[in-house]
Image (cartoon, helix red, strand yellow):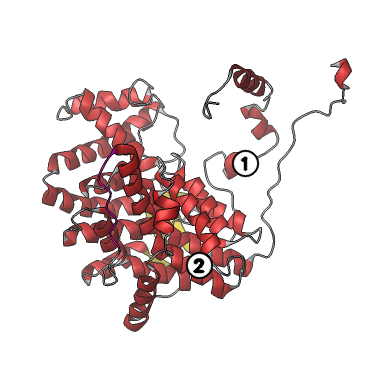
């Protein structure tokens, strides 16, 4: 049997399924249902409380009206712009400090940070034979699926996997935070060897290196990287570490955690959510869009760039989805603070890599796209570049393969997921169970012989 074959019978059943769906868009308004847990303006419906992070995109004016403002992101009440400014000024990495802040709601002292980094370093390894048995013997083509499968497999190596006490969950989360770079990169090396015929090499991490440095070290065959490369990857990890409790994968973490299940199941579920192109896979779409643009037009001609963007919205270019990828966000309108920060440092890296022309193209699109979108779409709020717009370019300049773009997002976001999992365990006590309104009329059962 061809395992992947869609038989004629399956096609018939799929057609039957399509015709049996009678839920129409206007039914949501009729029943006052916030589809996708969003109101008509696209704002998320409040579904919980959190202390982990906060997004600010509006301010209240003197008349009491909510007006858009420059986007701000807060980790445990601390503005991310200030957090970044602090560790950049000290010329030191910031990801480990950010993880500590998210987990424990306070900035660490130097001694606390040193002890925390040492603990992560001790956890930065995998069980004996795990790489051979769980990664190399079962290579896959999708890095997120490999990562999710590896996380579930670690359950079997944990002698106390189902204990949901604070101490045990913290221990599991710290181990996963330390192990994620290894799981992602080794999965990629396995894919490259078994599916693309490349030489196989497995570098073990170095205890003296931080998360970003180790990621570059174990990924590259020669293990070499520049200080700016490591600093910019570290910055990207900080900016992706957390983004409010309402994003899809974090909400998934809350929902699954509320059932009382184990850490590995909860984090695997979050990975499944992040894999989706509407969530973690967006920066890949940005890169593919720019690749298509460069292949089909003269990108030095601004009129040609403008025409291409119009054709994107008219579903006549690239994937014909009608989207300019990397533009717009569910919450931010005037600006995404993460994009603002990345833009500044991406410019520096473009100069080091000799990619100034490509960076200028990104800036051109960033300026043109909001104007074109406003002309062609009914807008409830402003549109600006989001973090995916520049993160893909940063990863490309770092020489990171497309296959690892979303796993790197996960390597960062496991910090936020861990904080939210612990918060849900400590404060909820009830399973999350939203309500659905049935719009199917009651029908009588008909015996098989009379159908």
Q: Is residue 195 left or right of residue 91?
A: right
Please state the extent of the stretch shown in magenta in the rendering.
197-204
Q: Is residue 40 left or right of residue 92?
A: right
Q: Nearer the viewer, residue 49 or 130?
A: 130
Q: Position of residue 149 (x, y in %)?
A: 49, 50
* Tag 2–tag 1 contact (CB < 8 Å): no
Report the residue that reaches farthest toward the bottom.
111
- Characterize the magenta stretch by its predominant secondary structure: loop
Q: Is residue 272 left or right of residue 237?
A: right
Q: How many marks?
A: 2
Residue ID at (32%, 48%)? 189
Is 188 covered by the magenta stretch? no
Q: Which mark is residue 34?
A: 1
* Residue 407 appears anywhere in the view: yes
Which SS class for mark 2?
helix
Q: Which mark is residue 7?
A: none
The residue tagged 2 is 172
Residue ID at (35%, 53%)? 186
Which SS class for mark 1?
loop
Q: Earlier in the sequence, mark 2 or mark 1?
A: 1
Q: Nearer the viewer, residue 330 or 214?
A: 214
Which quadrant holds the N terminus? top right
Q: Is residue 315 left or right of residue 225?
A: right
């Amino acid at each position: 049997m061809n395992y992947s074959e869609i038989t004629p019978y399956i096609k018939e059943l799929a057609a039957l399924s399509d015709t049996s769906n009678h839920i129409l868009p206007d039914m949501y308004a009729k029943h006052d249902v916030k589809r996708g847990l969003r109101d008509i303006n696209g704002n998320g419906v409040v579904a919980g409380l959190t202390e982990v992070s906060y997004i600010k995109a509006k301010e209240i004016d003197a008349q009491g009206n909510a007006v858009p403002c420059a986007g701000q992101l807060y980790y445990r009440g601390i503005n991310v712009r200030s957090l970044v400014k602090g560790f950049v000024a000290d010329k030191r990495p910031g990801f480990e400090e950010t993880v500590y802040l998210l987990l424990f709601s306070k900035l660490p002292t130097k001694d606390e940070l040193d002890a925390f980094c040492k603990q992560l370093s001790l956890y930065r390894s995998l069980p004996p034979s795990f790489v051979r048995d769980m990664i190399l013997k079962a290579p896959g083509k999708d890095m997120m699926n490999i990562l999710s499968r590896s996380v579930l497999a670690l359950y079997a190596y944990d002698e106390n996997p189902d204990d949901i006490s604070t101490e045990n969950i913290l221990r599991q989360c710290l181990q996963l935070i330390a192990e994620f770079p290894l799981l992602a990169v080794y999965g990629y090396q396995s894919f490259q060897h078994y599916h693309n015929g490349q030489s196989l090499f497995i570098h073990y991490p170095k205890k003296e290196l931080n998360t970003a440095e180790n990621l570059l070290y174990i990924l590259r065959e020669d293990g070499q990287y520049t200080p700016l490369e490591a600093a910019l990857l570290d910055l990207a990890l900080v900016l992706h570490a957390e983004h409010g409790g309402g994003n899809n994968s974090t909400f998934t973490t809350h929902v699954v955690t509320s059932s009382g299940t184990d850490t590995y199941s909860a984090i695997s579920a979050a990975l499944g959510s992040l894999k989706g192109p509407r969530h973690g896979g967006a920066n890949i779409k940005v890169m593919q869009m720019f690749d298509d643009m460069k292949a089909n037009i003269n990108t030095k001609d601004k009129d040609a760039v403008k025409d291409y963007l119009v054709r994107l919205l008219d579903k006549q270019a690239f994937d014909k989805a009608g989207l300019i990828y990397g533009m717009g966000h569910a919450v931010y309108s005037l600006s995404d603070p993460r994009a603002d920060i990345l833009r500044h440092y991406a410019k520096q890296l473009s100069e080091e890599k000799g990619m100034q022309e490509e960076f200028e193209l990104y800036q051109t699109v960033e300026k043109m796209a909001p104007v074109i979108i406003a002309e062609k779409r009914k807008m409830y709020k402003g549109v600006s570049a989001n973090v995916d717009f520049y993160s893909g370019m940063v990863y490309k300049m770092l020489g990171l393969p497309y296959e690892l773009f979303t796993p790197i997002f996960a390597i960062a976001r496991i910090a936020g997921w861990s904080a939210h999992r612990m918060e849900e365990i400590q404060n909820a006590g009830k399973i999350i169970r939203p309500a659905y309104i049935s719009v199917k009329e009651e029908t009588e059962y008909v015996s098989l012989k009379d159908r």
